[in-house]
Image (spheres, rainbow, N blue to C red):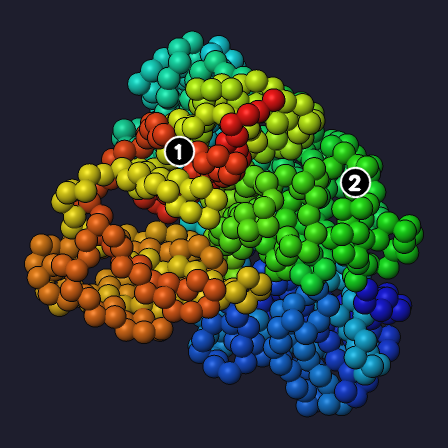
Amino acid sequence: MPYHNYRKDLMGSAQITPKGSFEVGSWQSFKIEYKAGKFGIDDQGGIMIGMRPHYDGSKLQTINPKEEGYVTVETSTNIPIDFKIEIRRSIRPLQKNLYIICRRYLNENDRIIIRLGDKRFGSPGLRLQTFCEKKFDFKMLIDPFATQDFIPLPDEKNPEISIVPTNGEIWKLIAPTQRRLNEKFNIFIKCEDKWGNPSNKVQKKLYFFSDKLIEGLPKIVSFKKGEFSLTIRDLKIKNEGVYKIIVKDNKKDILSISNPLIIKNSKYVHFWSDMHGQSRETIGTNTADEYFNFAKNKSFLDICGHQGNDFQITDEFWKHLNLLTKKYNEDGLFLAIPGYEWSGNTSVGGDHNVWYKKENRPIFRSSRALISDKTKNENDAHTSKDLINKLIKEDALVVAHVGGRFADISYAHDAKLEPSVEIHSAWGTFDWILKDAFKLNYKVGVVAGSDGHKGRPGASFPGDSVFGSYGGLTCHLLEKLDRDNLFREFRARHHYATTGARIYLDVQAFFDKKTLLKETSGKRLNISSCLMGDEVLTSSSYTDLKLNIEGTAPIEKIEIYDGLKLIKVIKSFEKNSIKKRIRITCAGQNYRGRGRLVNWDCKAIFESGKIKQFKGINFWNPNRQPKKINLNSIEWKTVTTGGSSSVDIWVTEEAFLKNLILENNFKNIKLNLKDIDESPIQYDFGGMDIRLIIETLPIKLIQYSINANLPIKLINNKEARIYVKVIQEDGHQAWSSPMYIKKMNNIN
């Protein structure tokens, strides 16, 4: 962090009370006492308290002493002071800051007393952030000379607390998605608090059930207080099929049902990754070591990568990251992939993820904006074109990413280095980047990750901040779990993306005439079928698209695309199903960059009938859920960042006799529910794709599995770009990497 470091030892010290560990989301009040150092504080000098941008507790405020987050400041000598709260005015990662200016000087040992969440005047206090942090520091920076050049206190003189999980409420049982017959596997169980943190405050006897034989599955296991997770090892299944494991409590109530586990002998097995997130050494939370530990032992990933912003990665930290990936990487169990985020401005290409197959490769930075290292300037890559040129001889993978700085894939692209684009992360859902690739005639697959900044790779709950979505996952089709297989199949685009659910997706295309697979090596192989991601030449007039999908929740529909064109929708229910459920969906984004977030404030009023029940979908903040305000009205507030939030409302038949009035912060809507037929009604509100959708659904969806065969006509000398999008009732989605199928009369 490039603050001035002049005589940090003489800048004073700070103490915080109370000290210790505090639960996420709890109400607290802290007093920080800064004791001036040898120089004192000059007239017009002062101090700054900095917090990281993804702190999502109470907003600090100085206006209303009865509201949360109220801040007061005084000095031991009662000199006049000014203080203010500012956002994004100091050097990253300290972007939520309290500035205190002394209007008279202070002597050595004089004190400044800051109360955060000051309860003395009626405030409920300060609500802590929603995610755990072993070392949460209120970073103190001092301006003793009134130069506006702030000098940080030494770490040992800085006030800090620990933020820990609260009581567990939500049990999660995680199984592999696909394994072969008689192949040993493990299952995992944890209990998350309401904010998505694995809790170690639960003690319970767990009872396991399956309707099919699973060798080694225990009947009962004790989950002990102090444990964050439990692993049941070396299970085995002899027969093909779709398996689900159920865990119950001693009252036989279901605590959790696992994701679907498919057992079949096949060339490829499914492995899950989140290859994109950050730790506190850059802009994230907790250490990089704790980051990989969470991925392996708390979210149960198979593959993980760390993607710190390159302009914050020092040479020393780059070496440390490479040591960590080497330490955690173990073929067959867990892959830790070395890499970084090339974080160039959008004007020179925008964010791109870079991964290496091996450790100790160069870091080609977009800039050195926040580091002072001056070694190997020849490795700087200021544009994505420069990056491609630097990486051309490396055994590396690159993926365009949409984060704060969105990638402009039209600026530069290399097909060998960049096999895929990131379609979803905690920042939101970005189908548009795949559409951009199609318009540019790129052949790309799709991946998803979290870009999590809260220390939870693979289980990136957004909390109460600018992240509008649950972090994504990528499922890789590999023969076995090692880096060679990962990189080979990644380049072949043999993977699919989800919004974080471990959905099983098998998409294949079959041909009745000569067909050639174009391998990434340049070789061509005779085939009769291809997988997602494959590029083929065929003389067949049709391809038979075969889908096998197992959801983690009931499936609402499947959309099948040929490039930019939607060619087929498969719904999981009949056209004439009895529909007494209204779904209202808020969706979209303002634009592609940091200002994409859309705020929604809605109220639904039914002129007749009653609301029987309701449910929010993709409302990730447990304190901000839809609320029923009377028998026929419901209101909600939410945010969208490219994805969507929906409210399902089950109503009586009388509701369909009159109007639905939908008040919102864009344009109020009055709609006769009889006007909604099989197609949703959509209202567009500008921005990039801000929209409100009203549709009807059956009372209950029950179909978790869809198997379908669909003939698709191929046009001579035209390439079909076939991919599938799965939409579940619970809002989770999955996208297959496109298959690129070109029809030619004569192929060799």
Report, in whole angstroms, how far the alpha carbon at label 1 lies from the one at label 2: 38 Å
Q: x, y (%) of residue 477?
A: 55, 27
Identify the image quadrant of the C terminus: top right
Q: Is residue 539 visible?
A: yes
Local crowd at mark 2 within 10 Å, few (<14), some, or many (≥20)? few
Identify the image quadrant of the N terminus: bottom right
Q: Up-down: is 537 above or below 32?
A: above
Q: Quadrant of residue 574?
A: top left
Task: Mark 1 or mark 2: name the one nearer the start of the chain.
Answer: 2
Q: Is 11 positioned to the left or the right of 680 in the image?
A: right
Local crowd at mark 1 within 10 Å, few (<14), some, or many (≥20)? few
Q: Which residue is mark 1?
A: 713
Circle 2 SS class: loop
**Residue appearing at x 63%, y 39% in the figure:** 419
Identity of the amino acid at label 1?
Lys
Q: x, y (%) of residue 29?
A: 54, 67
Residue found at the very far front of the displayed protein: 746
Q: Is 421 positioned to the left or the right of 354 in the image?
A: left
Circle 1 SS class: strand
Q: Nearer the viewer, residue 665 or 722?
A: 722
**Residue appearing at x 9%, y 54% in the figure:** 653
**Residue appearing at x 47%, y 81% in the figure:** 64
Closest to the camera, between mark 1 and mark 2, is 1
**Residue appearing at x 36%, y 30% in the figure:** 711
Q: x, y (%) of residue 432?
A: 51, 53
Q: Is residue 216 visible?
A: no
Q: Which residue is mark 2?
A: 392
Number of numbered markers:
2
Q: Up-down: is 272 above or below 568?
A: above
Q: Nearer the viewer, residue 404 or 88?
A: 404
Identity of the amino acid at label 2?
Ile
Q: Up-down: is 726 above or below 145?
A: above
